[in-house]
Image (spheres, helix red, strand yellow):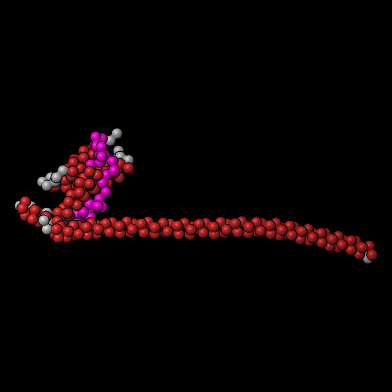
Amino acid sequence: MASRLEINFIRLLSRCESIASEKRGEAEWRLEKYVGALEEMMVALRKSVSKPTAELLTEYMRKVDFLKGLLEADKLSSTTEKALANQFLAPGRTPTIANERMPVSKTVHMQTKARCTGEMRDELLGTGLSGKGMSENELRNRRGVPMDERQSAAELEAVLQHHHNLQEKLAEDMLNLARNLKNNSLAAQNIIKQDNQTLSHSMRQADLNFEKLKTESERLEQHTKKSVNWMLWLMLILVSFSFISMILFIRIFPRLR
């Protein structure tokens, strides 16, 4: 069961997503305050005893980071910069509340990208803020100039192609990074495998040396036992010979009376 802190966090998060999905203006400052409060509550959730699962915490943090990135992107001056910043935003993957069919953050992300694309098109075609004061006749006259339209269309195509090239370059860089990581992991795996083989060979060699040492020790022990037996027999022979010699000497040379 969700704690009171988590319930308040979900309510505030849903409110922030609702504000972000609408046309902001006067509510912009409130959204910034709410996002700041969400960050504080997120820290408290992480330290809470009854904190949610790691997957939920990751999803909550993802949505808070998306809202922060959305606010930072809106503060950029250039429409192109806003479009690029919105491209790198990662919306939430699951609905915040139960009655959502689709995550609101994904809807906000699509709306923001569409708005940035429209603003870029308006800037290139000259129908942005500078064209709001034109009359219908002026707009018709302007649309009647095919060269300007072709030039604006070419500029729009160039900008879109530039963004496409940037995305392709980023994807290529990510692929190269993944390829390098894979190569490094394979090289490390080969080195570890070689080290394991060397260690196994050293252990087998150590076992062989131990067996040889054990065999030589047994042979030395047997040789030592044989040497001791020969010395014992030699001492017995010498003692026996000395005893017999003494008896013979006494028999041959009796004691003088």
- Can the viewer see residue 90 in this picture? yes
Left or right of residue 217, residue 174 in this image: left
Identity of the residue drawn at 45% across and 59% down: 187
- Can the viewer see residue 9 in this picture? no
Towards the viewer: 185 or 138: 138
Q: Does the magenta stretch include residue 63?
A: no
Start-end of magenta stretch: 79-104
Q: Position of residue 98 (x, y in %)?
A: 26, 35
Q: In which quarter of the image is residue 131?
A: bottom left
The quarter of the picture where the C terminus appears is bottom right
Q: Position of residue 100 (x, y in %)?
A: 24, 37
Towards the viewer: 136 or 121: 136
Q: Quadrant of residue 178?
A: bottom left
Q: Position of residue 67 (x, y in %)?
A: 21, 47
Q: Position of residue 75 (x, y in %)?
A: 16, 54
Identity of the residue drawn at 27% across and 48% down: 90
The quarter of the picture where the N terminus appears is top left
Q: Main secondary structure of the magenta part?
A: loop
